Amino acid sequence: MIDTIFAPATAAGRAAIAVVRLTGPRTASAVRALAGQLPAPRRAVVRRLYGPGGAEIDEGLVLWFPAPGSYTGEDAAELHVHGGRAVLAGLLEALAALDLRLAEPGEFTRRAFENGKLDLAQAEAVADLVDAETDAQRKQALAQLDGRLSEVQGRWRDGLTEALAMFEAAVDFPDEEVPADVAARAQPILAGLVQQLEAAAAEVERGERVREGYRIALIGAPNAGKSTLLNALARREAAIVTAIPGTTRDIIEVPLQLGGYKAIVADTAGLRSTEDIVEAEGVRRAAAWAGAADLRVWLVDGAAATAPEPPAGLAPTDLILRTKRDLGEGDADLPGTPFTARSPNDVAWLEQTLTERVVEALAAAEPPAATRLRHRRLLEEAASRLRQAMAEPEALELAAEDVRLAARALDRITGRIDPEAVLGKIFSSFCIGK
């Protein structure tokens, strides 16, 4: 028998309201045990809630969602009580005493998926929506939750079905009145699908950046002003600033919102040769983080006597700042735009410049259909199978099999045939109660 589960749906800690969700076949009996009787479906009613032995827990709202008209597709309920820790603890203890089980991370949404209320791409969008910190992340998650990726995947699959029908007609009915070029007619369909799949796979990186954040690395020699700049952008003392070279030895990341998008700015260890084992590890990590960043901001010490060598991996599109402008112009041969983190105008100019870079990289007319590395791998697998099918115009059985395998790859995007291990990995990233 399927377990009946429960979990808080609101954050831990003291609050005005706490919401506890229940779902499963024993939900109705649990609500009766706590509140006396079931309310009308989807109507909030005030009830006193009682635990084992008739001890009063609280007075709150009770909502009842009979199957299949619930989030999970099962009988479900919500209990809205006062948000004190003692109240919530008492309610959870009462539910456990009724032999209900505390839900695992993502178990409510997994049941919604298993009961056909959501496909796998939409379930992933639920997690993204819960985690959304910016307006762009919210819009992208809502588009996927509304079924945008599922709708596009359905159109791709229709094209594959049409092409497969042509191959199978040529293979299964060679002596019937089937046009001789029926298999050849599948080629333009496959070519168009390959183009669409590759374009969608290329867009995944933008979707990942919207979800995870646009990465900006502050790099340069020790005492070039990286930590001071990070603090200015963060508007708090995120990094320790001293006159001692090599103070920063690890990566210090600060999330920002730029133009409605999430960005992660990182202060890194000063780039130099050193015999200090700890500092050397910091320099190695700084180079690795900067190498994977979307944008590097190279800070050149404006008080330096000579121009430094550009850091490895610096791209023509990266920014160069000549720091400490407030101390004087210094050597005019030093590269970069004169800048000081102590000037509100300079910091505002840099924030605007960074915002323009982020928006240029991540903005588009609409959110990408696919947004995760898992999606990209499956899209690339499907495109590869279709290219193989196009390369075998005479081997119709092999071409048909490649088209079938491409369809299977696309089906795994929405979870039609995903293995248990993949489902477990996806839903384990959810929070308890979702």
Image (cartoon, helix red, strand yellow):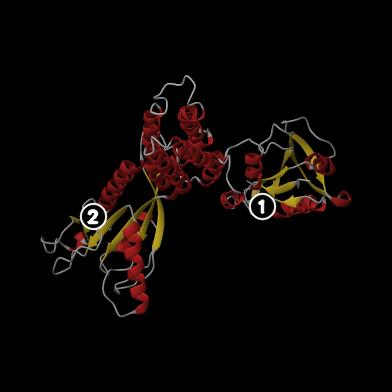
The residue pinned by badge 2 equals: 315
Q: Of all residues shown, which one is farthest toward the top?
A: 177
Q: Residue at x 81, y 35 (%)?
A: 38
As drawn, 341 above or below 119: below
Residue 389: in sight, yes or no? yes
The residue pinned by badge 1 equals: 104
Q: Of all residues shown, which one is farthest toward the left?
A: 332
Q: Residue at x 14, y 69 (%)?
A: 305
Q: Residue 218 or 400: which is nearer the viewer?
A: 400
Q: Dot 1, crowdedness within 10 Å: few (<14), some or many (≥20)?
A: some
Q: Amino acid at mark 2?
A: Ala
Q: Dot 2, crowdedness within 10 Å: few (<14), some or many (≥20)?
A: few
Distance in Å between CA atoms under marks 2 and 1: 45 Å
Q: Amino acid at mark 1?
A: Glu
Q: Residue 374 or 243: which is nearer the viewer?
A: 374
The picture quadrant where one finds residue 381 is top left
Q: Secondary structure at mark 2?
A: loop
Question: Who comes first in sequence, dot 2 or dot 1?
Answer: 1
Q: Of all residues shown, which one is farthest toward the bottom?
A: 275
The picture quadrant where one finds residue 364 is top left
Q: Of all residues shown, which one is farthest toward the right?
A: 53
Q: Residue 200 or 214: which is nearer the viewer?
A: 200
